[in-house]
Image (cartoon, rainbow, N blue to C red):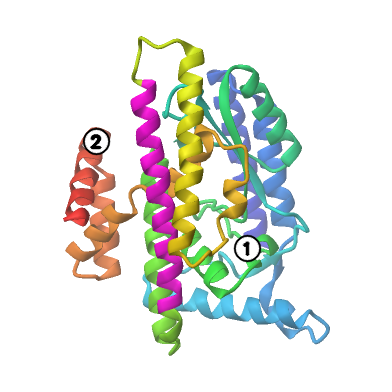
Amino acid sequence: MIKWLQKRYLLLATVSALAGACLLTGCSVGYYSQAIGGHLKLMSAREPIAKILADEEADPELKLKLQTLIDARQFAIDELGLPKNESYSTYAATGRDAVTWNVVAVPEFSMRARTWCFPVAGCVSYRGYFEKARAEKYAAQLAKEGFDVNVGGASAYSTLGWFDDPVLDTMLRGGQSRYVSTLFHELAHQVLYIKDDSSFNEAFATFVEREGFRIWLRARGEEDSIDAYNASLQRGNDFAELLKSTRDELVAVFEQTDIEEEDLRAMKAQVFADMQTNYANLKVSWNDYTGFDRWFSQDLNNAHLLGVSTYRRLVPAFRAMFEEADSDLVAFYQLASDVAKLPAATRNERMAAYGQQALN
């Protein structure tokens, strides 16, 4: 009880600090209120996983998934060098499709995302809401200002170790590869997070989740599942490469300063049409795998392309960094931390060099 009160006091103190910073920077107090209120609601909905596992009337499928996550949590501590704390020892049911909805906004003729800056997280390329309607309302406002926008649901988020984050029902949809790797991803954010560099943070966590899940499968004697997992990652890589080539084409289009806006729109539309054709060809090489059909069925724009890019672009660079650390995760964390401490320009150069190393 005392620990819970200390955590609540810390949250309230953080609220006060954020409100003060908000007044100084001119941001919306209402925005912070919904974020803090949404987080408090999640915290108050938590119940110990151990209690659920001991409940004979609890849903068997839920208990099986939660037990797997308890095992994965201990494995993350013992074998992956991830933090030992009370995070993910509780469960919260939201009954929602997503825990938060993130708004991404990109100018119509640019591939540089708008950023929002916050006192704790720094500057990031999205703005999160606990209510979908609020996210869509804000996205509509940005669209009126001429931005390409996208509202995407997130199944989990991390408080970076400030609070004891719960396992959420939104995290448990799908198979083991989804919810165990999500756990590893969120814990990785507690190992390393730097302000103002979403691409670095998300790619680091994505690399840790992937490598960690492979190690998890081997330890459980499930080597046969690794090929299927790697195949799914390869499809993801193919998808990312398609989006990268599309972004590169759009950058080339937008750099043409002597073209009228209507012509630019027509050229942009053609690039997106070509992407759809390329996707159809890509599916043939996947034996008509349809896992990305829903994504491609959207009315796609610049914001969709950059939203995916944030998580994937630097993953190959972290692979090269991991190999430099002799495939030792703890040494890799230290090397990544050293790179993170570099000035932004130097850090970007170092990551570009790792990326080139990965290509070679």
What amino acid is found at the position of numbered circle 2 in the picture? Pro
Quadrant assignment for the C terminus? bottom left
Q: Residues within 10 Å of mark 1 (few under 14, many from 20)?
A: some
Quadrant assignment for the N terminus? bottom right
Q: Secondary structure at mark 2?
A: loop
Name the quadrant containing residue 331: bottom left
What amino acid is found at the position of numbered circle 1 in the picture? Met
Determine whether 316 is above or below 117 in the image. below
**Residue 92 in picture, x, y percent from top left:** 71, 63
- Magenta span has 296? no
Tell me if 10 is positioned left or right of 220 in this view: right
Tell me if 155 is positioned left or right of 114 in this view: right
In this figure, which residue is indicated by the disc labeled 1?
Answer: 171
Tell me if 62 is positioned left or right of 224 in this view: right
- Mark 2–mark 1 Cα distance, whole angstroms, equals 35 Å
Specify the farthest residue to the bottom: 221
Asked whether 281 or 46 is in front, the reply is: 281
Would you say the magenta stretch is mainly helix, strand or loop?
Answer: helix
Q: Which residues are magenta?
A: 227-254
Q: Residues within 10 Å of mark 2 (few under 14, many from 20)?
A: few
